[in-house]
Amino acid sequence: MTTTTTTTAAVPVTAAKDTPAVRRRRRRGLAPGKRLPASRLIGPAFFLALWAAASAAGQLDPGAIPAPWTVLRTAGHLWTDGTLPTDVLTSLERAAYGFALGLTAGVVLALASGLSRIGEALIDGTVQLNRAIPTLGLIPLFILWLGIGETFKIAIIAIVVYIPIYLNLHAALSGIDHRYVELAEVQGLSRLQFVRQIVIPGALPGFFVGLRLGVTGSWLSLVVLEQINATSGLGYMMFQAQNYGQSDVILVGLLIYGVFGLVSDSAVRLVERRVLSWRRTLSS
């Protein structure tokens, strides 16, 4: 009887330890937690603080890596002289034209390939072949075709942009569950309704991943292209500074490229969170 009583008394204790509230707390502990305010600025701010501390302590060679305040002072002089605004606007214009062309091409080709077997047969293999060819290796050929003006730079940026957009959007379209297609057929949806209600919501997550990669790729390619047969732009400014050993001017250009990349990526993330607010993910 004593043994039976002890076993019976132990059952409520075990159940009390495993209540639904306790299980929810356990599951909640696996998530990353609440988003920190301005979390994407913490890393750059920490790096800037380390840079400033090392410069103040004399641990960095001012000729190779100038102090942050020296770089800011140089940026102020370049802005006052009117050189920096012109170069910034030129770079923004090139990146915008190339990105717009790449975005349009990536979306159109992905839709044609992802929604049609004939389109996939004609397009996907060609794009995969293009992806395997180093895009910057096409620069000499494009110079022969298009000249050394702005056209070849914009064309190279467009190629760098369209490839990740196409790949991610095509993968998202191909990954849509076939049960949704069957459901749309049972419901009698038209082609347009199917695209609007099934295809677009299912493909948007992949599209935004490709869009972020495309935005970053436009800036990365611009750094190289503006140092080839250019007479203006941030890359040209950095190339000229290299010839005169002006490391502070080079760092000004690199920081501006970094700021542009961070701002454009943050803008895409913001639009993504608003458009895909119906999703419940670890990020949200």
Image (spheres, rainbow, N blue to C red):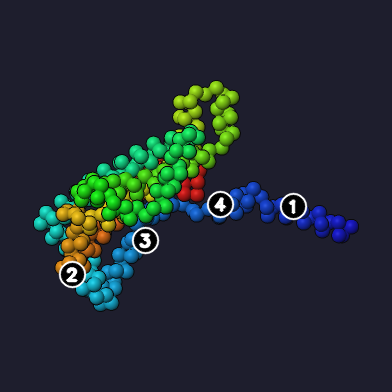
Q: Earlier in the sequence, mark 2 or mark 4?
A: 4
Query: What is the crowding at mark 4: few (fewer than 14 residues within 10 Å), some, or many (at least 20)?
Result: few
Q: Is residue 166 above or below residue 112?
A: below
Mark 2 element type: loop
> Would you say residue 77 is visible in this rendering?
yes
Judging by the rendered image, the residue that carries numbered circle 4 is 28
Residue 230 at what x, y percent from top left?
19, 54
Name the residue tied to disc 2.
245
Disc 2 marks which amino acid? Gly
Quarter placement of the N terminus = bottom right
Say which residue appears at 14% left-offset and 59% top-offset.
78
**Mark 3 or mark 2, whichever is nearer to me:** 2
Residue 95 seen in render: no
Task: Specify the quadrant of the image occupied by residue 224.
Answer: bottom left
Q: CA distance from mark 3 to mark 2?
A: 29 Å
Q: Nearer the viewer, mark 2 or mark 1?
A: 2
Q: Disc 3 marks which residue?
A: 43
For this rendering, which residue is in front, 130 or 104?
130
User: In the image, is 265 to the left or to the right of 168?
Assistant: left
Query: Residue 26, how many percent across, how many down?
Result: 60, 54
Q: CA distance from mark 3 to mark 1?
A: 49 Å
Residue at far bottom of view:
58
Mark 4 lies on a secondary structure that is helix
- Residue to which mark 1 is pinned: 12
N-term-proximal mark, 3 vs 2? 3
**Front: mark 4 or 1:** 4
Mark 3 element type:
helix
Residue at the (55%, 55%) spot, across then down = 29
Residue type for callout 4: Arg
Density class for disc 2 (Cα within 10 Å; few <14, some 14-19, many ≥20) is few
Asked whether disc 3 touches disc 4, contact meaning CB atoms under 8 Å apart, the reply is no
